[in-house]
Image: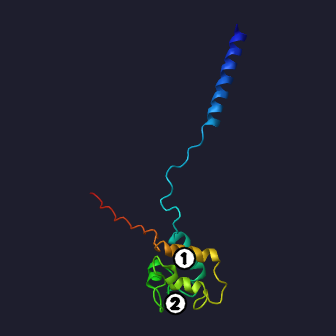
Amino acid sequence: MYRKSRILLASFVGASTIGLGCLCIAAPPKKKTHPAPDAGRVSYYHQIRPILIAKCLPCHSAANHAGLLDVTSYAALLKGGAHGPAFVKGKPAKSLLVGYLHGKPMLMPKGGPPLPKEQIALIEKWIAQGAVDDTPKPHSKASPKESHR
């Protein structure tokens, strides 16, 4: 009797395990139903700014502002330089920044290798999308709590 119970129990456990295994295999993993809100959007802070800092900052900063252009921040880039605004939101073809990256009237970065076509295309796409500033806002320090006596 003991042996029959053991065999029956083993059969039940084995069948249950196989059944659960089949359910796990048959059930597809849950897919994300909500795409990222900025899917396909080019980020100034995460994509454009690093290019500008790496390639343009040596000549276009507050300390060394060739052409009076400063690329250290979105606000400075938006202000532009001696030849006008660096970009026209929504119009990469009318943006000085894009012209200089293509060598019209002069190839930038000056004295260095030109930016890869993918980086130029990314800057053009960012401008075409409206050149949005997505720089994170600085955290304001919380005012110290008053001490209670």
Q: Is residue 3 visible?
A: yes
Q: Which residue is mark 1?
A: 124
Please indicate whether residue 1 sits to the left or right of residue 89 in the image: right
Please indicate whether residue 111 sits to the left or right of residue 76 in the image: right
Q: At 30% across and 60% down in the image, what residue appears? A: 147
The x and y percentages for residue 82 are 47, 92
Please indicate whether residue 109 sits to the left or right of residue 90 in the image: right
The x and y percentages for residue 13 are 66, 22
The color scheme shown is rainbow
Q: Is residue 59 above or below residue 129?
A: below
Which disc is residue 65 wearing? Answer: 2
Quadrant (top left, top right, bottom left, bottom right) of the N terminus? top right
The x and y percentages for residue 109 are 61, 86
Element under label 1? helix
Q: Is residue 63 above or below residue 19?
A: below
Q: Nearer the viewer, residue 54 or 83?
A: 83
Q: Amino acid at mark 2?
A: His
Which badge, 2 or 1, is on the more N-terminal residue?
A: 2
Label 1 Cα neighbours within 10 Å, binned few <14 / some 14-19 / many ≥20 = many
Q: Residue furthest top?
A: 1
Quadrant (top left, top right, bottom left, bottom right) of the C terminus? bottom left
Q: Amino acid at mark 1?
A: Glu
Q: Nearer the viewer, residue 22 or 139?
A: 22
So how many labels did they put on this image? 2
Q: At 46% across and 73% down in the image, what residue appears? A: 130
Q: Is residue 115 above or below residue 22?
A: below
